[in-house]
Amino acid sequence: KVWAEVARVAEAQSAPDRALRAYEATLALDPTDARALAAIVDVLEAQARWPELVSAIRRRSQAAGSGWQQRQDLVRIANIQASFLDAPKDAIATWSEVSSAYGESADVVDALSELYTRTAAHASLAELLGRAADREDEHLASVRCRLGETYFKQLADAPAAVAAYRRALLADPTNESARQGLALLADDAGVRAEAIAALARSYELADEWEPLLALLDQRL
């Protein structure tokens, strides 16, 4: 408590270095003191001491162990590296840490896309965007499939269900739920042709020729 009070007085007197030494003394007694760790970050940011700030944030992140605070700290480090330190490769490494620990979410993809473009890492950019596109296709297919199920099972709207399942298969031609829905709808004379055509198109897009030929035989 004594060192914490010394630090607060030093900050009030606009003596950041003395405040930092006092906070470090606090941490020498308790390396996990959250208030001291946060105060050091605040002092360094106010002084625009970016390399030291990155080290201080990383130390706080490590003390946090895991979870929301650690992710926020890593993102903050990456943003400082990318902007104030003009170190895009370091920022890429930090965003990769975020991705490995917490998943390749949309903010990770957006940040890495900009950084890969900035560093002309075109192969890495293509791999990143390819993974993101695959996830988007899978999610879009799932949403459209659920829409098809709603039209089919809850609203008894066969034409709308066929359209939704068809759109699901355009996003993911191998989506089995959409295929099963269309197979059931093929028993409905009113939409039979459309359902079979949508199924045939999905097999064609997936290069699944045996079921496609079987379906064509069924149409004939």
Image (cartoon, grey):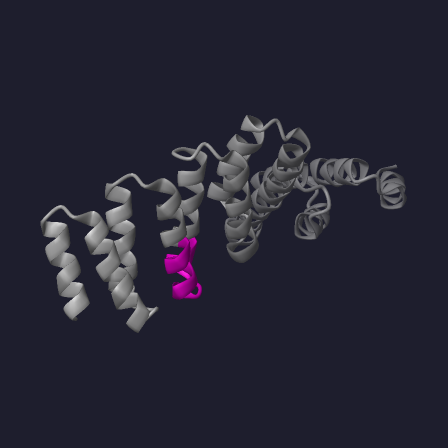
Q: Is residue 109 visible?
A: no
As drawn, 135 above or below 18: above
Q: Nearer the viewer, residue 89 or 152?
A: 89
Measuring from the top left, give residue 206's x and y in whole percent.
Answer: 79, 40
> Looking at the rendering, in which quadrant would you find the N terminus?
bottom left
Q: Position of residue 213 (x, y in %)?
A: 89, 40
Q: Residue at x 37, y 53 (%)?
A: 57
Whether the magenta-drawn stretch holds residue 62 is answered as: yes
Apparent side of residue 104 relative to residue 40 in the rendered image (left or right): right
Residue at image coords 84%, 43%: 208
Q: Which residues are magenta?
A: 58-71
| Residue at screen point 44% across, 39% down | 81
| Spot occupied by residue 106 in the image (x, y as percentages of width and height) | 49, 42
Image quadrant where one finds the C terminus: top right
Is residue 45 one of those drawn in magenta? no
Examine the rendered structure and indicate whether residue 201 appears above or below residue 75.
Answer: above
Which quadrant would residue 28 be assigned to in this image?
Answer: bottom left
